[in-house]
Image: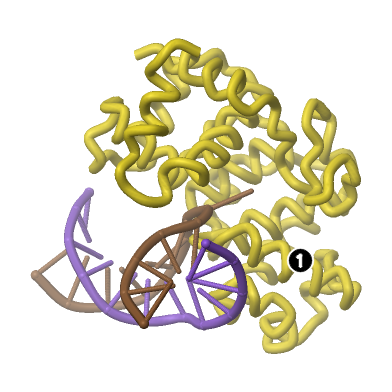
Chain colours: A yellow, B brown, C purple
Amino acid sequence: MDLLLIYNKLFSLYGPMGWWPLSSSNATENGYHPGDYSLPKTIEDRWEIYVGAILTQNTAWKNVRIAINNLIAAKALSPEATIQLFQNNLAELIKPSGYYNQKAKKLQFAADFFIKYEKRKEIPTRDALLSIWGVGEETADAIRLYAYHQPEFVVDTYTKRIFTSLGYLKGDEKYSDIKKLFEDNLPKETTLFKEFHALIVKHAKEFYSKKPFGVGDQLLNGKG
DNA sequence: AACCAGGACGTGA
DNA sequence: TCACGTCATGGT
């Protein structure tokens, strides 16, 4: 049950991922900033993480990218603009990310929440984030980890898929069970949590989108 | 041309 | 609590 070993193998395979991708970062083409763990530093970047975390729910990041670019072009990538826009106009801008009616509503609730916490200069608790309509466990953890540098392990479908395939999970565990498994078996370090989640996504995109998963498993089991 | 993507919510057992 | 339906576009 050495999750740190798996992490080290992933890191040696791919190197630092530089999550969360931000449009303000020109480190790489798609906003990744490998090795720079200081981001986000600005309110604008923090909000963009909220937006990305919500828009990417059950959605390919490629589509989220298009939606965020639409928001930027419309000068609507701010919590204030998000609230001021009519919901159907906001929905139109984020259409490429799918579920656009739901997500427009989610963004407006999140924007309201975000502004309140920025005014207070306060980091929202996990429970506070979970009280937002449209923010579930994974989204809350992603926001806490990447927007506020809080040590929350983020569990997604890829995490379940890889670690079920490797035999660490049966496959029917609850989110909280999986989160606990990782947090109990890893040092509680924000940077580690950021990279691990990003590396899981990277590796899964490569080897776990279609069965069989043997190649991906071997890369993590074999000598690294 | 099915199938899936960095989920969450509402509902009825 | 749990299982299932709903939400929806774009890439492969």
The vertical placement of B13 against C12, above or below, is below
Where is residue A118? Give x, y as percent.
82, 50
Amino acid type assigned to the residue bearing label 1 in the image: Ile
Q: Chain of mark 1?
A: A
The vertical placement of A174 against A149, above or below, is below
The vertical placement of A177 against C2, above or below, is above
Q: Secondary structure at mark 1?
A: helix
Where is residue A16? Give x, y as percent.
70, 27
Where is residue A135? Give x, y as percent.
55, 57
* Residue located 58% across and 33% down the image: A199
* Residue located 80% across and 74% down the image: A70
User: What quarter of the picture does the N terminus of chain A occupy?
Assistant: top left
The vertical placement of A48 against A13, above or below, is below
> For this rendering, which residue is in front, A14 or A45?
A14
**Quadrant location of residue A17?**
top right
Where is residue A147? Give x, y as percent.
73, 42
**Quadrant location of residue A189?**
top right
| Count of marks placed on residues | 1
* Residue located 40% across and 27% down the image: A180
